[in-house]
Image (spheres, rainbow, N blue to C red):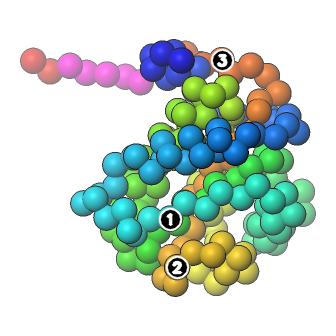
Amino acid sequence: MEFDKVIDKRVSTRAFLDKKIEKKDLEKIVEAGVKAPVGKSQYENMAITVITNKEFINEILEEAREIVNDPKANPIYSAPYLIIISAKDGHVTRLEDTACIIENMSLKATDLEIGSCYIRGMFERFDKKARFIEKLNIEKDFYPVHGLILGYPKEELKGKNHSIKTNYID
């Protein structure tokens, strides 16, 4: 897909089909994330975990529900895939780096007609002792920062009329 069309179509998806994403497409999405800019090129301070196991996704969701004390909360919108971006403890630009990684992956997902949504709030509520962290198989001193949910959208990807006030100063 042409780049401008990808940008025009990219939208946060919150309703998904129960349809498998091919491994090669997941790998393309991850590769786009790996190519994102990272502060001072400290790529060794970042980690990407792709979760395709629905039971494990549900474990993470249940832990999130416990934290907000709401058994019906669904901050991952029943998405069939979850990608978690983790950073080494103390990595100064972890928030910015995570945003860049997730944006690249979201754009690639859109290019593949796969829906995505940046998940921030849920991960910001977890502390470094969250039960699921050990199962992520990430290095010691790495912790989840944010996530990206993926899946084929129930509705066709259609961009919105994005508008941000812009000033040009000559």
**Residue 139: % across, % down:** 52, 79
Q: Measuring 55% from the left and 60% from the top, which residue is drawn there?
A: 48
Mark number displayed over residue 47: 1
Question: Disc 2 to disc 3, how far (Cα)?
Answer: 38 Å
Whichever of labels 3 and 1 marks the residue nearer the N terminus, that label is: 1
Tell me the element at label 1. strand
Q: Left or right: where does residue 103 sit relative to residue 115?
A: left
**Residue 96: % across, % down:** 39, 54
Q: Is residue 89 shown above or below 12?
A: below
Q: Left or right: where does residue 9 sit relative to residue 71?
A: left
Image quadrant where residue 166 sits:
top left
Q: Are marks 1 and 2 in contact (CB under 8 Å)?
A: yes
**Residue 106: % across, % down:** 56, 38
**Front label number (2 vs 3):** 2
Q: Where does label 2 land, which residue?
A: 139
Point out the residue furthest to the front here: 24
Tell me the element at label 3. loop
Q: Nearer the viewer, residue 71 or 31?
A: 31
Question: Disc 1 to disc 2, how far (Cα)?
Answer: 9 Å
**Front label number (3 vs 1):** 1
Question: Disc 3 to disc 1, how far (Cα)?
Answer: 30 Å
Q: Measuring 81% from the left and 59% from the top, which residue is drawn there?
A: 53
Mark number displayed over residue 158: 3
Amino acid at pointer 2: Glu
**Residue 62: % across, % down:** 84, 67
Mark 3 packing: few (<14 Cα in 10 Å), some, or many (20+)? few
Q: Which stretch is magenta? A: 162-168
Q: Left or right: where does residue 21 sit relative to residue 143?
A: right
Q: Is residue 81 shown above or below 160?
A: below
